[in-house]
């Protein structure tokens, strides 16, 4: 999040008590995971990922409610 907020590798390293080289190594891993190749593209990729996770959570909640309603309805018709 520090890198996505625009903090330099040196400042990020200082904040996290590590070297800028270590920050660069981790950033390369993050870039690969999110399919980006620059710090400039990182905030958009993070926002897109959070939107997908949010949608997934909403869909899961709707399915859970639907399942509860379906189970309640089937118990009523069985009895």
Image (cartoon, rainbow, N blue to C red):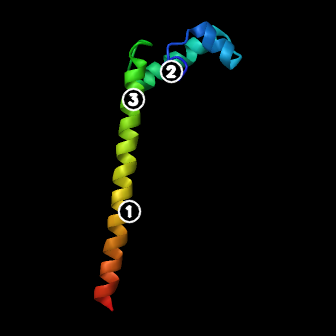
Query: Does 36 sit above or below residue 49?
Result: above
Disc with the residue nearer the chain's start (2 vs 1): 2
Q: Mark 1 sits on what residue? A: 64
Q: Mark 3 sits on what residue? A: 47
Q: Position of residue 4 (x, y in %)?
A: 48, 19
Q: Quadrant of the C terminus?
A: bottom left
Disc with the residue nearer the chain's start (2 vs 3): 2
Q: Position of residue 30 (x, y in %)?
A: 49, 22
Query: Does 58 sit above or below residue 1?
Result: below
Q: Position of residue 46 (x, y in %)?
A: 42, 27
* Viewer-side label of 2, 1: 1
Q: Residue lying farthest left? A: 77
Q: Secondary structure at mark 2?
A: helix
Q: Position of residue 11 (x, y in %)?
A: 62, 10
Q: Secondary structure at mark 1?
A: helix
Q: Would you say the residues marked 2 and 1 are in contact, meaning their CB atoms lie under 8 Å apart?
A: no
Q: Which label belongs to residue 29?
A: 2
Q: CA–CA distance between discs 3 and 1?
A: 26 Å
Which residue is at a point 52% across and 17% down the rendered structure image? Answer: 3
């Amino acid at each position: 999040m520090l890198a996505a907020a625009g903090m330099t590798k040196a400042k990020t390293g200082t904040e996290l008590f590590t070297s800028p080289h270590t920050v660069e190594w981790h950033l390369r891993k993050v870039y690969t995971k999110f399919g980006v190749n620059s710090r400039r593209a990182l905030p958009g990729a993070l926002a897109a990922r959070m939107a997908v996770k949010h949608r997934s959570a909403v869909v899961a909640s709707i399915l859970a409610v639907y399942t509860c309603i379906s189970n309640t309805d089937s118990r009523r018709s069985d009895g």
